[in-house]
Image: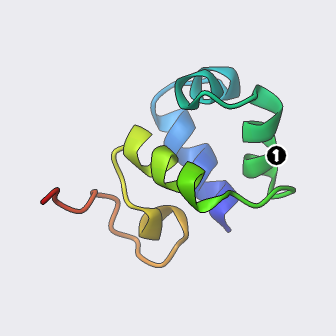
Amino acid sequence: MIRTRLIHLRESRNLKQKDAAEALNIPTRTYGNYEMGTRSIPLDILIEIAKFYNTSTDYISKITNKKEAYPSE
């Protein structure tokens, strides 16, 4: 599930949900709902989350287990 990846990424940086939400400029409750899996993540927000955690949307979506972000072009 996406939620476990989000929680792991956030906790590995010692952040609270509030910290991640503020960095992404979204409400804390919304970010919490993403982690709980009660709300779908819009594509534009998923991309911003991947950039914030320096990973790929594929990693967050569990398409791959490779945590590193793709190289920028």
Q: Compare residues 4 and 54 and report the one nearer the observer.
A: 54
Residue closest to the far front: 44
Point 55% across, 46% down: residue? 8
Mark 1 crowdedness (10 Å alpha carbons): few <14, some 14-19, many ≥20: some
Q: Left or right: where does residue 15 sit relative to residue 42?
A: left
Residue shown at the point (27%, 57%) measured from the top left: 68
Disc 1 element: helix
* Left or right: 73 in relation to 70: left
Q: How is the image coloured?
A: rainbow
> In the image, is residue 55 above or below residue 58?
above
| Residue 5, image x, y percentages | 57, 56
Left or right: 17 as drawn, with respect to 20: right
Residue positioned 33% across, 45% down in the render: 54
Reply above or below: 17 against 30.
above
Q: x%, y% of residue 10?
A: 55, 37
Residue extending farthest bottom: 63
Quadrant position of residue 19: top right
The quarter of the image holding the N terminus is bottom right
On screen, residue 10 versus residue 29, left or right, reads left
**Which amino acid type is marked by label 1?**
Asn
Q: Is residue 53 visible?
A: no
Q: Position of residue 50 (x, y in %)?
A: 44, 51
Kindly identify which residue carries mark 1.
Answer: 33
Q: Is residue 24 above or below residue 48?
A: above
